[in-house]
Image (tube, rainbow, N blue to C red):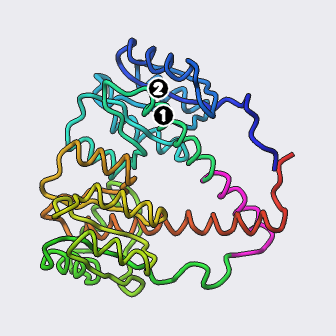
Amino acid sequence: MSKESTDEKHRILIVDDEQGIVNAVRRELLTPPVGRYRYEVETFTNPGEALERARQQEFEVVISDYRMPQMDGLAFLSELARLQPDCVRMVLSGQTDLDGLIRMINETHIYRFIPKPWSTYFLKSSIAQAVQFRQASVENRRLAKILREHGIDLPRDSINPVDQILVVDDDVNIANAIARSLTQRSRLDDVFREVRQEAHGRAPQLNPASISVQISNTPQHALKMADSVTYSCVIADYRMPGMDGGQFLSSFNEKQPDCAAILLSGVANMESIVIALDLAHIHAFIAKPWNDFELRAAVAQALTRRRLLLENRILAQMCKARQLGAID
């Protein structure tokens, strides 16, 4: 496979209703030092026009404001995700409300939140990481497809068929309640599923037979558990003694970067959720008291996404070992 040319430009889409903001972000990305990547930047002050452009041109990263008069960031990113699911979604905003941020995390799975006014280093490093993340995901999927087309599938037992889930909460009763929520099916599940599918389309379902749930009442003990067990998903409360949920999930991510992370809390604020998103790349935020069906749906979606990424990575490695899929 040919190495990436230093002259290759990565397409970035910037959407903000303030012309001064889009000009400033564009200037930041094109002003030396630009770092590892070079960018082709397109800017829009009207999200509707940005979507029209997205129907014609593929973008690698989108940076969107949240509060815009024509269409808010949630609606814009939801539609963009439908048009370009591989485009990494980021939010740059100074006026996002807590509910809006949570919905963007849970519904559009934003990669990062950058507050206004922004740090030049954080902006540039976040975009570079987003480009790298997308490149790896797209390339692994491409190589995995080539291997499948050759009739080669994933080796048996290459991924544990049972997903290990770790629940961390200093209140053992709550941790046990979450564990029961994940392993016991409610009579209302079918009703909630029909409503959800009608609103959002078909969603993955959690199979209690294919998961194993463990609990810990301290983040320190949970981090030690991560040294001996590979987890598929970790669910952590925010307010815990000695280390809050954002700090814990960030440390856990360093040990097990492939583990899907979910923050669950009744007291977390904007700042704590943003930190958890930016440092631990949380897949979802669940508010206490939680809805059992929504909790199970979030975990099922996180597990499905994790498994797909792992399968593609393993198949891509096999493809490279067989010297298939090289691009001249």
Looking at the rendered structure, the kind of residue marked 2 is Ile
Give the labeled residue for mark 1: 62
Q: Residue at x 48, y 30 (%)?
A: 51
Does residue 185 appear to the left or right of 212 in the view shown? left
Q: Is residue 325 above or below residue 3?
A: below
Does residue 80 appear to the left or right of 166 in the view shown? right
* Residue range of the region highlighted in magenta in the rendering: 137-153
Q: Residue at x 26, y 82 (%)?
A: 185
Residue 188's disc number = none
Residue 90 part of the magenta-drawn span:
no
Figure quadrant of residue 104: top left
Say which of 114 and 203 sits in front: 114
Q: Residue at x 61, y 27 (%)?
A: 39
Figure quadrant of residue 25: top left
Q: Quadrant of the C terminus?
A: top right
Q: Which numbered disc, 2 or 1, marks the residue that appears first in the sequence? A: 2
Estimate the x, y position of residue 6 in percent, counting from the top left: 73, 32
Mark 1 residue element? strand
Q: Estimate how packed mark 1 is, as few (under 14), some (14 to 19) or many (20 or more) residues with alpha carbons within 10 Å.
A: many
Give the labeled residue for mark 2: 14
Q: Residue at x 27, y 59 (%)?
A: 263
Figure quadrant of residue 245: bottom left
Looking at the rendered structure, the kind of residue marked 1 is Val
Q: Is residue 300 above or below residue 139?
A: below
Q: Estimate how packed mark 2 is, as few (under 14), some (14 to 19) or many (20 or more) residues with alpha carbons within 10 Å.
A: many
Estimate the x, y position of residue 199 in percent, counting from the top left: 32, 54
